[in-house]
Image (tube, helix red, strand yellow):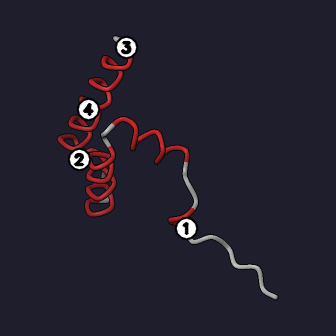
Amino acid sequence: MFESKPAKDDVDDPVEIMLRRTGCMELHYKVQECIAETQDWRKCQNEVKNFRLCMEEHRKTVKNI
């Protein structure tokens, strides 16, 4: 009778799929958490740096394959 919508977690977000493949998902979450807590991304430079380094390392790995 009623068509249920898929739960939010059941819908694959293309960004989340990409982040899972990089292995940098947890660092991405840390950036998001910091920004949510501080309301200022400038106060999250350490988290942003760690995420950026992880993404750069992933790009190097993919390039060498």
Q: Which residue is mark 4?
A: 54
- In depth, the one of 51 and 24 nearer the eye is 24
Rendered image: mark on residue 65: 3
Pointer 1 local density, CA inside 10 Å: few below 14, some 14–19, many at least 20:
few
Quadrant containing the N terminus is: bottom right
Viewer-side label of 4, 2: 4
Identity, as a three-letter code, of the amino acid under mark 2: Cys
- The CA span between labels 3 and 1 is 34 Å
Q: Which residue is mark 1?
A: 8
On the image, the x and y values in percent for residue 37 come to: 27, 63
Pointer 4 local density, CA inside 10 Å: few below 14, some 14–19, many at least 20:
some
Of pointers 3 and 1, the one earlier in the residue sequence: 1
- The CA span between labels 3 and 2 is 32 Å
Rendered image: mark on residue 26: none
Identity, as a three-letter code, of the amino acid under mark 1: Lys
Q: Which residue is mark 2?
A: 44
Pointer 3 local density, CA inside 10 Å: few below 14, some 14–19, many at least 20:
few
- Residue at left 31%, top 55%? 35
Q: Is residue 7 left or right of residue 27?
A: right
Contact between labelled residues 2 and 4, with CB atoms less than 8 Å apart: no
- In depth, the one of 16 and 21 nearer the eye is 21
